[in-house]
Amino acid sequence: MSTYAIGDIQGCYKALRRLLKKIKFSPNKDNLWCVGDLVNRGPSSLDTLRFLQDMDHCTKIVLGNHDLHFLAIHEGCAPARSRDTLSRLLQAQDSSQLSKWLRHKQLAHFDSLDTIRGPENFLMVHAGVAPRWSLQKTLDLAAEVEYALQSKDYKKFLHCMYGDKPIRWYEKLQGQDRLRTITNYLTRVRFCDDIGSLRLNIKEGLCAAPAGFKPWYEYEIITHKATILFGHWASLEGRTGKHRVHALDTGYVWGRELTVMRLEDQRRYSISN
């Protein structure tokens, strides 16, 4: 049995199937961890969600910003955008079922696995964490957003989810500002400064860092307890330069590669467009 973590699929269903075939993935004995952004930008979001729902028994999924965006559109809490490719998914007969299934997924997943190096802890998020968040703090704050998504008032969260402010985390944040800030770190962060101030408008690679800002993983304090897996940042091309921080979005939807990493030995497998 092996556990594989896959980068942003973004509705590229045929590529997902090709990559799983390449690694001889078996739903009966293997597990698949998805770092989020299952849907949008690619051509087959509906097929992707149906396929992953059918494999729910062997998958672990964290939500990405595009997944949350789909939920918000589906629930009438936000308008579609011109670059969205969600029409077929939104119009499908089982759209509500798939939306409910997705809404009950995590924003951070933690587990311990037996690897070739011995027992190893893994934390999976879509984008990143704030500078002073411990492992437990990250899981606790993710649970606050998960609770909001799964509560009777989930539409209130989806309606208020959008926005770049507050620009950093602090403990006294409350209500929707608190939930939005947590969500922005877990699903949107790329660059921040040493106190966690966010620059969410910058989506390019490391050379685009503003003065005083670095990639979020240069400030993390988690890797002494867990290896971090994340997606979201295709411009990194799968490289962070940190031994226990693994970038898995290698930009298939932008014409590059779809990548999966076997967690037991950290071997990567990829397919190209």
Image: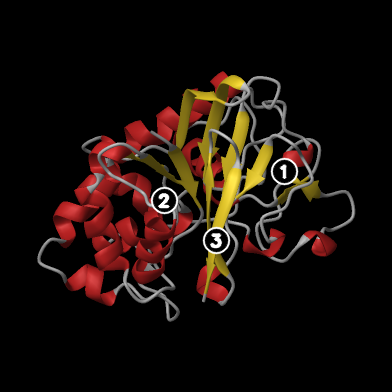
- Mark 3–mark 2 distance (CA, rounded to whole Å): 37 Å
Whether residue 69 is visible to the viewer of this picture, yes or no, is no
Q: Is residue 215 visible in this depiction of the protein?
A: yes
Question: Is disc 3 placed on a helix, strand or loop?
Answer: strand
Query: Label 1 sits on what residue type?
Result: Trp
**Could you say whether the residue bearing mark 2 is in a helix, strand or loop?**
helix
111 vs 127, left or right, is left
Residue 104 position within the rendered picture, expressed as x and y whole percent measured from the top left: 28, 39
Q: Disc 2, disc 1: CB below 8 Å?
A: no
Say the numbered circle drawn on residue 270: 3
Q: Which mark is residue 216?
A: 1
Is label 3 in contact with label 1 (beta carbons under 8 Å)? no
Furthest-left residue in view? Answer: 93
Lower sequence index among marks 3 and 1:
1
Residue at image mark 2:
160
Residue at 30 percent across and 62 percent down: it is: 48
Residue 252 in the image: state x and y as whole percent.
53, 69
Instruction: Residue lying at the far right in this picture: please name it.
Output: 211
Instruction: Give whichever of 166, 116 is nearer the camera.
Output: 116
Q: How is the image coloured?
A: secondary structure
The amino acid beneath tag 2 is Cys
Mark 2 crowd level (few <14, some 14–19, many ≥20, 10 Å Cα):
some
Residue 118 vs residue 106: left or right? right
Looking at numbered disc 3 in the image, what kind of residue is underneath it? Ser
Q: CA distance from mark 2 to mark 1?
A: 24 Å
First in sequence, mark 3 or 2: give its number.
2
Position of residue 195 in the picture relative to residue 165 (left or right): right
Q: State how far apart marks 3 and 1 are (Cα).
A: 25 Å
Q: Which is in the foreground here, disc 2 or disc 1?
A: 1
Please provide percent x and percent y for residue 184.
55, 47
The residue that appears at 51% across and 76% down in the rendered structure is 273
Foreground label between 3 and 2: 3
